[in-house]
Every structure is written in structure tokens, then in C-alpha cells.
Image (tube, helix red, strand yellow):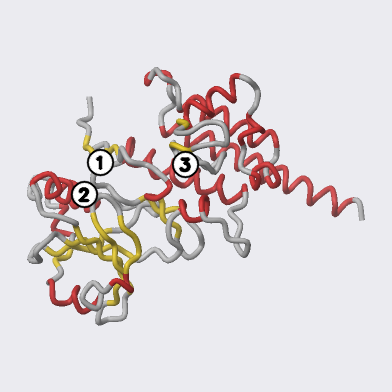
Amino acid sequence: MMNSYDGSVDKCKLFNSKELVKATNNFHANTTLGEGGQGTVYKGMLEDGRIIAVKKSKVVDEEKLEEFINELVVLSQINHRNVVKLLGCCLEAEVPLFVYEFISNGTLSQYIHNRNEEFQLTWEMRLRIATEVAGALSYLHSSAATPIYHRDIKSTNILLDEKYRAKVGDFGTSKFIAIDQTHLLTGEKRIFSSAIQENINLAEYFIQAMKENRLYDILDDQVKQMGKKEEIMAFANLAKRCLNMKGKERPTMKEVSTELEGIRALKKKKGMVSKIMKYLSR
């Protein structure tokens, strides 16, 4: 499998287990960055001073090994500013190890669900992050040599770098397709509970609120306070189209990316007009 993709996997550096053990202080608990279904991610430092993230698989069985190989092949072919960069892997350890670029500001999920008074995820940032993720997915679907479908886009798989730019990660369940959605608006988890109901499906809840013209009843408080109504409505209507039960009626990621860029461009244009008006009124 590794030899069947035009030699692209050869670009992936092979690390030895000793240097990764040393880099992570023997995978010490204090170096843990996060833990998911596929494995644990540790922070490490190579001898040349580079900070890295090392993903260590949880168990070695045929299914997990297939996911490991799949992610290796997928990431070795991707070069996009909004996709986490794979630096290499280690195949000689007891369990497979991935080595990624280190993304300093954690996951989008942390900023949505664990509120920090010192740092607020503004409407402008949410809109930009959504646009960056859509752009990355559009690239994977339409511009990669072989179309790639991530199949597990969620806020825990979207990392934020030092400038809070989005980086899509975790390609273990991705699929290549032969050539022939997330919760920025409400701040709720995919399945959540309210004061009157448990285990609510966010997608269904959102669609119902849109049908009943109750969007502002379910919006995240920060979005309501910081966002412009016309921008929020444009974003919400796009999200509604993405959740259409009929797959053929959903917009492509290229269309989603273009529409989000349009919302951002309109915002910038209005901001410029406002500055000009203030200047002329002096």
C-alpha cells in the first residue's frame, strides 16, 4: 500500500524509537497533549530543538493498524496550510507512532466548550476558522491528486496554531475516492442535554429552530453579542443546506468555501466603508 502512491510515502521520515522516547521523556504523562479513540498524543522535543507532537496508538490490532497505514498514506500526500503536517513515523516500536508538527494552541473544542474569560472566540475568528476548514476540505475533495474524504470533522480534530489559524488533523478514518459540518454557531456538543430534554441531536435541533424562526434562541451568547445579524443568517442558511437529508442537494465543499469567503469579504467591505465614513465625518 505504501509503495502504490507514486512513491509519495518516501517523503515521510522514519524516526527511530529511541529518539522519540527521549523526545517525550519516555512518553511521560506530563507531556500528554490529548487522548482520543485512536491513541494518545504527546509533546516532545527533538535533539535539534524542534517541538513535535507524537501520536502513540493505543493497541495493535488489524483494524487499528489499517487506520495507521491509512493516515500515513493520506497525510504523506497532503500539503496545505490548514492541514496538520506529518513529519514522519516510527515503525520499529511496539505500537505505531506518528510524528506531527506541534500546534501550539490546542483544539477548537477547548475554546468552544471550556470558556476562558481572558480569551474569547469572537464571531470574526469563528467565521475565519470555518472558512479555513472549508478551504482545506475543498482542497482534499477537489484539488488533491486523488480525492480524500476526512469523514470525522469535529471541533476536537481542528487544531489552532500560534495565530489561531485552523489546522485539520486526525485522518485515521479518511477514505480515498476514485475520480469518476460543525457547531460554531450554538456552542453545543453534537449530542447535548437541556433543562427540559436529554440527548438532543444538535443537527435536528438546529434545523427545527430554523424552520420555526428561532435561530437566535439557540445561538451562542458570544455569537449573538459580536456577530452582525445578516452575517449570522447567511452562515446559518449555509449550515442548513449542508445538513440537507438528501446528499445530492447539499453544497460541495468548494461551494461552501466560496460562500464563506463571500461572507468574510462582505464583512471587510462594510468595515472599510465604516472607516471611510468616520474619516469623512471628522
Residues packed near mark 2 inside 10 Å, few (<14), some (14 to 19) or many (20 plus)? many
The first of marks 3 and 2 along the sequence is 2
Q: Is residue 125 left or right of residue 152?
A: right
Query: What amino acid type is highlighted by mark number 1?
Result: Ser
Q: Residue at x 14, y 64 (%)?
A: 90
Q: Is residue 145 left or right of residue 166?
A: left
Query: What amino acid type is highlighted by mark number 3?
Result: Lys
Question: Quick one: SS at disc 2?
Answer: helix
The image shows a total of numbered marks equal to 3
Question: Quick one: SS at disc 3?
Answer: loop
Q: Position of residue 173 (x, y in %)?
A: 24, 42
Q: Residue at x 59, y 19 (%)?
A: 211
Between tags 3 and 2, which lies in front?
A: 3
Q: Residue at x 63, y 36 (%)?
A: 232
Residues packed near mark 1 inside 10 Å, few (<14), some (14 to 19) or many (20 plus)? some
Q: CA distance from mark 2 to mark 1?
A: 7 Å
Residue wearing tag 3? 189
Residues packed near mark 3 inside 10 Å, few (<14), some (14 to 19) or many (20 plus)? some
Residue wearing tag 1? 174
Q: Is residue 112 left or right of residue 101?
A: right
- Looking at this view, name the residue that lies furthest to the right: 282
Residue wearing tag 2? 71
Q: Position of residue 2 (x, y in %)?
A: 10, 50
User: Given contact means CB atoms under 8 Å apart, are the residues at marks 2 and 1 in contact?
Assistant: yes
Q: Position of residue 231 (x, y in %)?
A: 65, 36
Q: Nearer the viewer, residue 197 or 201?
A: 197
Q: Is residue 42 left or right of residue 278?
A: left
Q: 39 above or below 153? A: below
The first of marks 3 and 1 along the sequence is 1
Q: 109 above or below 15? A: above
The first of marks 2 and 1 along the sequence is 2
